[in-house]
C-alpha cells in the first residue's frame, strides 16, 4: 500500500512581495531612536522638595467643622444652583463670616448649566489681608446636585472653610493675603471656580481646594486640570507631606501614572482645582473621594467622619501655613507624572511619545516608496480615503447642526457631574436622527466605495498605504495640539502597520490586529467607565462633552479623520475595499448627485457670465 504523501508546507511569502510589503528590519532598526528618550524618561525623574511645616501646631476644630457641615446640610439639603436652598446657603456663609468681622464679597451672574438651564449663581469670598497683596485661596463649593443633602460633598469643605477663617482672624497677621472662597456650581463641573479663575483681579499664587473631606475613604490628592498642565510639584509634595503628618505617616492616595497620563492626554476633572491649574495657577484638591465625587443621595449627615474632617482640616491649615512662609517656591504650573515621591518630567514623556512615531513614520514612508517602485497606483486609494473623510466630516457637521437646535446637552463648557441625568440620559431620538442622516450620507457615498469587480492585491495594498499615511498625518496633528494625547494614537499606528501582512490570514487573525489597534480609544473609554464610574454611559458622556464644547472642535475633527482612516483599513481587512473608480467604472448619477451636480454647474455658469460681463464693461 502506497504511503500517503505529507501535505506540502505553506511557503512563507518573500520579503517585499505584495503579501509581505512592510520592511520589518527597517521598522526594528528605527526603534533605536527610542532608546535615548527612554533613558531620559527612566533616569530624568527627580524628587521634588517640600516646604517646611509652619512652627505653630494645627488648632483646627474638627468637631466644630463637622457640626457646621451637618447643620448646613440639614437646613439647606437642596442647594442646587438657582434654588431657594442655594440662596439660603449663600446667606448662611455670609452670616458665618460676619461672626468674625470678615466682609464678604459677592459675584452674581446667570449662566446656562447643563441639566439645569439658565440659573442664577453666586460666588462669595472673604479676605484676610496680609502683608503682601499676593493671595493664597482656600476654596470649597457650597452647592450640591439636589439629589441628597450633600453633607460630605461639599458641606464638609464649606464648613472647613469657615473653621479655617476663624483661625486667621485672631492670630498673627499672615504674610500673604488669604482668601476664603465659597463657589457656586461646583457640583456641576466647577462652574463657579472657572468663573472666579477667569475674572478675579487678585494676584493668586496658590489654591487649596477642599471637597468631600469627611467621607470614609482614604485621604487623597487631586491634581488634574482642564488643560494638559500640572500644579507646581513643590505644592503637591508639600500637600502630601502635610496630609501624611496628620495621618501617622501614610501618604495620601492619588491617581496612578497611567491615569495621570490619560488625564494629560484627555484633560478632564470634576474638582475645582482644574480651572485654576489651566490658567497657570498652582492648585491642589484635598478629598476623601475618588476621581469622581461621592453621590449626594448616599451622602448622609450622620455619616460624616470626624477623623477625616479633622485630619484634612488640619492638613489644609498646615498647608496654608507652609505656603504663607514660602509660596514663592511653589509657583507656576508644568507637566509631569507623579510617581510616589518622584516625578517624571513632562517634556521627557512627550519626547518619548513622539519618538514612538519615528519607527512608524519611517516604515510607512518606505511602504509608500515600495508602492511607487512597483508601479502601484495610489491616487484611486487616496481618493477613496478622501471620500471616507468627507463622509465622517459630514457626520460631524450634522452633529453640530443638531446641537444648534438643542438636540444635545447645552450650557457652559464644563464637564457634567456623572451623578446628574445629563451624564446618563442618552438622547436616543437625536442619536437616531444622527445615524439616519449619516446613513443617508453613506448611501450617497457608497456608489464610489463598494467593490463592483475583483480587487487585486496591489489595489488592496494601495488602500492600506493611503490609510496608513493618513494616520501618520493624524498623529502629527495630535502631536501638534497635545503630545500627551499620542497615548491614544500610538497603539493604532503600531498595530495597523501590520495589517498588510495579515491580509491573507484567516479572519480571526485580522480581527485581533484591528482590536489591538483600538486599544488607545478603549483606554479613554475605559477611563471614563471605571475611574469616573460611568460604566456603559461612557460613550454617551463623550458625546455630551463634545456637545458642550469641553472637547474642542479641532479634537473632534482630528478624531473623525482618524475614524475615516481606520474605516478604510477595516474595509480592506474585511475584503470590502474598492479603490475610487475611474470615469468608465462609475455608475450613473443618482437623483441626489444629479441635483448637486446641476447646482454646481449652474453656479459655475453664473460666475462665467458675470466674469464676461465685467470684461465687456471694462472694455
Image: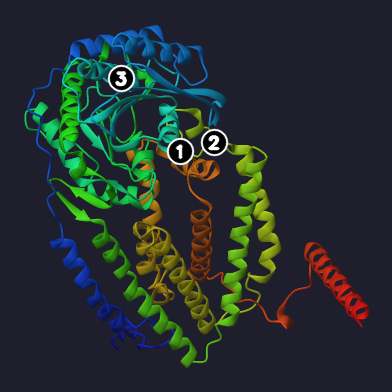
Q: Which residue is mark 2?
A: 426
Q: Are marks 2 and 1 in contact (CB under 8 Å)?
A: yes
In the rendered image, which quarter contains the N terminus? Answer: bottom left
Q: In percent of the image, x 66 and y 47: which residue is there?
A: 401
Q: Is residue 160 left or right of residue 58?
A: right
Task: Residue 144: tell me if it is visible.
Answer: no
Query: Mark 3 or mark 1, which has the lower sequence index?
Result: 3
In the rendering, which numbered label is found on residue 152? 3
Task: Residue 384: tell me if it is visible.
Answer: yes
In the rendered image, which quarter contains the C terminus? Answer: bottom right
Indicate the position of residue 284 as horizontal and vertical percent values. 27, 37
Q: Is residue 226 left or right of residue 446?
A: left
Query: Mark 2 or mark 1, which has the lower sequence index?
Result: 2
On screen, residue 463 above or below 152: below
Indicate the position of residue 381 as horizontal and vertical percent values. 57, 77
Q: CA distance from mark 2 to mark 1?
A: 8 Å
Q: Which residue is mark 1?
A: 537
In the rendering, which numbered label is found on residue 464? none
Query: Which SS class for mark 1?
Result: helix
Dot 3: few (<14), some (14–19), or many (≥20) neighbours within 10 Å?
A: many
Q: In percent of the image, x 28 and y 41: which residue is there?
A: 282
Query: Which SS class for mark 3?
Result: helix
- Image colouring: rainbow
Indicate the position of residue 157 as horizontal and vertical percent values. 29, 22
Foreground residue among 30 and 19: 30
Query: Mark 2 or mark 3, which has the lower sequence index?
Result: 3
Amino acid at each position: 500500500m502506497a504511503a500517503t504523501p505529507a501535505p506540502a508546507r505553506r511557503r512563507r511569502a518573500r520579503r517585499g512581495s505584495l503579501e509581505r510589503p512592510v520592511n520589518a528590519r527597517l521598522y526594528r532598526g528605527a526603534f533605536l531612536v527610542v532608546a535615548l528618550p527612554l533613558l531620559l524618561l527612566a533616569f530624568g525623574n527627580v524628587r521634588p522638595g517640600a516646604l517646611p511645616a509652619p512652627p505653630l501646631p494645627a488648632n483646627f476644630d474638627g468637631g466644630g467643622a463637622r457640626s457646621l457641615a451637618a447643620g448646613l446640610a440639614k437646613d439647606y439639603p437642596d442647594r442646587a444652583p438657582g434654588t431657594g436652598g442655594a440662596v439660603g446657603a449663600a446667606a448662611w456663609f455670609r452670616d458665618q463670616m460676619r461672626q468674625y468681622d470678615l466682609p464678604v464679597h459677592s459675584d452674581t451672574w446667570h449662566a446656562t448649566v447643563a441639566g439645569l438651564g439658565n440659573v442664577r449663581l453666586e460666588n462669595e469670598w472673604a479676605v484676610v489681608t496680609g502683608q503682601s497683596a499676593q493671595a493664597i485661596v482656600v476654596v470649597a463649593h457650597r452647592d450640591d446636585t439636589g439629589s441628597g443633602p450633600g453633607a460630605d460633598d461639599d458641606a464638609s469643605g464649606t464648613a472647613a472653610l469657615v473653621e479655617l477663617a476663624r483661625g486667621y482672624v485672631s492670630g498673627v497677621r499672615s504674610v500673604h493675603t488669604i482668601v476664603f472662597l465659597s463657589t457656586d456650581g461646583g457640583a456641576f463641573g466647577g462652574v463657579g471656580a472657572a468663573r472666579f479663575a477667569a475674572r478675579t483681579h487678585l494676584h493668586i499664587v496658590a489654591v487649596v481646594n477642599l471637597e468631600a473631606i469627611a467621607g470614609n475613604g482614604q485621604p487623597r490628592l487631586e491634581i488634574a486640570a482642564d488643560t494638559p498642565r500640572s500644579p507646581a510639584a513643590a505644592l503637591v509634595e508639600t500637600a502630601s507631606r502635610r496630609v501624611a503628618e496628620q495621618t501617622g505617616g501614610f501618604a495620601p492616595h492619588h491617581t496612578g501614572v497611567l491615569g495621570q497620563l490619560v488625564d494629560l492626554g484627555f484633560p478632564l476633572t470634576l474638582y475645582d482645582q482644574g480651572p485654576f491649574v489651566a490658567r497657570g495657577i498652582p492648585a491642589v484638591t484635598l478629598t476623601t473621594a475618588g476621581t469622581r465625587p461621592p453621590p449626594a443621595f448616599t451622602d448622609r449627615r450622620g455619616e460624616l467622619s470626624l477623623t477625616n474632617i479633622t485630619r484634612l482640616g488640619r492638613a489644609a491649615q498646615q498647608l496654608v501655613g507652609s505656603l504663607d512662609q514660602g509660596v514663592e517656591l511653589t509657583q507656576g504650573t508644568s507637566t509631569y507624572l507623579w510617581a510616589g515621591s518622584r516625578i517624571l518630567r513632562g517634556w521627557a514623556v512627550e519626547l518619548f511619545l513622539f519618538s514612538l512615531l519615528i519607527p512608524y513614520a519611517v516604515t510607512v514612508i518606505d511602504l509608500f516608496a515600495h508602492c511607487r517602485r512597483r508601479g502601484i497606483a495610489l491616487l484611486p486609494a487616496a481618493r477613496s480615503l478622501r471620500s471616507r473623510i468627507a463622509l465622517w466630516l459630514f457626520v460631524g457637521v450634522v452633529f453640530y447642526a443638531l446641537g444648534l437646535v438643542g438636540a444635545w446637552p447645552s450650557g457652559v463648557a464644563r464637564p457634567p457631574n456623572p451623578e446628574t441625568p445629563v451624564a446618563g440620559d442618552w438622547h436616543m431620538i437625536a442619536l437616531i436622527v444622527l445615524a439616519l442622516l449619516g446613513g443617508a450620507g453613506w448611501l450617497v457615498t457608497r456608489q464610489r466605495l463598494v467593490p463592483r469587480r475583483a480587487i487585486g492585491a496591489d489595489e488592496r495594498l494601495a488602500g492600506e498605504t493611503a490609510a496608513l499615511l493618513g494616520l501618520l498625518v493624524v498623529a502629527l496633528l495630535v502631536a501638534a495640539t497635545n503630545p500627551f494625547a499620542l497615548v491614544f494614537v500610538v497603539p493604532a499606528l503600531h498595530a495597523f502597520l501590520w495589517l498588510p501582512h495579515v491580509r491573507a490570514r484567516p479572519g480571526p487573525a485580522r480581527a485581533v490586529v484591528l482590536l489591538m489597534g483600538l486599544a488607545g480609544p478603549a483606554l479613554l473609554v475605559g477611563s471614563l467607565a471605571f475611574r469616573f464610574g460611568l460604566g456603559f454611559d461612557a460613550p454617551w458622556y463623550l458625546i455630551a462633552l463634545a456637545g458642550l464644547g469641553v472637547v474642542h472642535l479641532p479634537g473632534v475633527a482630528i478624531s473623525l479623520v482618524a475614524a475615516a482612516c481606520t474605516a478604510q483599513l477595516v474595509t480592506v481587512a474585511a475584503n470590502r475595499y474598492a479603490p475610487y473608480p475611474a470615469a468608465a467604472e462609475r455608475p450613473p448619477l443618482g437623483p441626489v448627485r444629479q441635483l448637486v451636480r446641476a447646482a454646481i454647474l449652474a453656479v459655475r455658469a453664473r460666475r462665467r457670465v458675470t466674469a464676461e460681463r465685467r470684461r465687456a464693461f471694462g472694455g
